Image: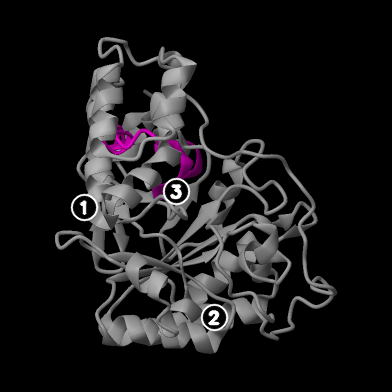
Amino acid sequence: MGDVTATLSKPALKIGPYEVDPPVVLAPMAGITNVAFRRLCREYGAGLYVCEMITSRALVERHPKTMEMISFDPDEHPRSMQLYGVDPVTMGKAVRMIVEEDLADHVDMNFGCPVPKVTRKGGGSALPYKRRLFAQIVRAAVQAAEPAGIPVTVKFRIGIDDDHITYLDAGRIAEEEGAAAVALHGRTAAQRYSGTADWSAIARLKEHVRSIPVLGNGDIFSAEDALRMVAETGCDGVVVGRGCLGRPWLFRDLQAAFRGEPVPPGPNLGEVAGVLRRHAELLAQHMGEDRGLRDLRKHMSQYLRGFPVGSELRHQFGLVSSLAELDDLLAQLDHTAPFPKDAEGPRGRQGSAAKVVLPEGWLDDPDDATVPSGAEIDHSGG
């Protein structure tokens, strides 16, 4: 199981006033990490569970869908919200609103999104290239959060591409501007989710940023991966995204591994059916049965991955629209089927590397602090 002692000898991860034990953070994923999925994951193990990413402008303007997305369970603590923004003024207003209305206990800032419709406007993973603007946005959030003692953390990628590396500057700036921690996804924007995450960059960032925790993100698909990342990079904690899709029990495994306990074996198909049913219940409570069951459809292939389930039955799972229908389908599964080897390893979207689309002249002057126009649009995190 890797070098468990190396991980256990590290001091506890602290994000501002909050101790995160085990040192595990659920990454925000658009359309995935709603209150129902976070509840499901929290039932398996402790950690820091971040809600779906919110645009600062939509929050300030009280967009109805955004206001619905920032809901938390009564026992969810700390309440962790991720904000995306490109304008220091709007970011400051958003964080002041969070403080004044007691909407969250921790703010994470996303500068890692590689989606073309975001980078072409200068947002997401394109933005840290503009060092002064990046500093101003982080500073605005930290200053607005300070009176309430709310920690602000910052997530980013290695850079735009291999020729435009920004992560060491981004880490230094975030540290200087008062961020409580930084997280690095070990890929460039050009890689998107393809290839392999460069964990050596996480190690370099950890050497570069000394006064605040450094979290590693990218290619954690098992508890062993998490222990190996900490051992290889010296990072203070891990951020898990795609690895928990269709397997929320990964947080149980991570908790065991970081405590030096044996990692439980993977669940058989009967146990997975129970997890799927629980996920459906929570979604139905959160958004109503019809909408909740439709939302569950996107998770089906991940839950059933590698198990002996016929193509027709898989197809029916993808069309499920009620709890009764789901129960009928779950009863048709072979509940004794063991957890398959095929379910291990990478999961979720991978895609292929591509040239990053940027605003015209974006790379001309990294010190230009002009706020990009029209970048605050709905998009997924990264």
Mark 1 vs mark 2: which is more N-terminal?
2
| In front: label 2 or label 3 | 2
| Secondary structure under the numbered disc 3 in the rendered image | loop
Q: Which residue is mark 1?
A: 285
Residue 243 within the segment the image draws in magenta: yes
Image quarter of residue 127? bottom right
Residue 102 in view (yes/no): yes
User: Label 1 to label 3, Cα distance in Å?
Assistant: 37 Å
Asked if the stretch drawn in magenta spans residue 261, the answer is no
Whether residue 268 is visible to the viewer of this picture, yes or no, is: no
Residue 170 relative to residue 162: left or right:
left
Q: Quadrant of the N terminus?
A: top left
Q: Is residue 214 above or below residue 119?
A: above
Give the residue at x 30% y 76%.
150
Q: With 345 as the anchor, is 269 left or right in this view? A: left
In the depicted structure, whether residue 376 falls above or below residue 217: below
Q: Amino acid at mark 1?
A: Gln
Q: Position of residue 104 (x, y in %)?
A: 29, 72
Q: The residue under label 3 is which amino acid type?
A: Cys
Contact between labelled residues 3 and 1, with CB atoms less than 8 Å apart: no
Residue at the image point whose x is 36% and y is 60% from the top: 51
Q: Mark 1 or 3 closer to N-term?
A: 3
In front: 319, or 177? 319
Query: Is disc 1 surrounded by few (<14), some (14 to 19) or many (20+) residues within 10 Å?
Result: few
Q: Is residue 109 above or below residue 135?
A: above
Q: Which residues are magenta?
A: 232-258
Residue of label 3: 235
Between marks 1 and 3 in the image, the one whose residue lies nearer the viewer = 1
Q: Local crowd at mark 3 within 10 Å, few (<14), some, or many (≥20)?
A: many
* Residue occupied by mark 2: 137
SS for tag 2? helix
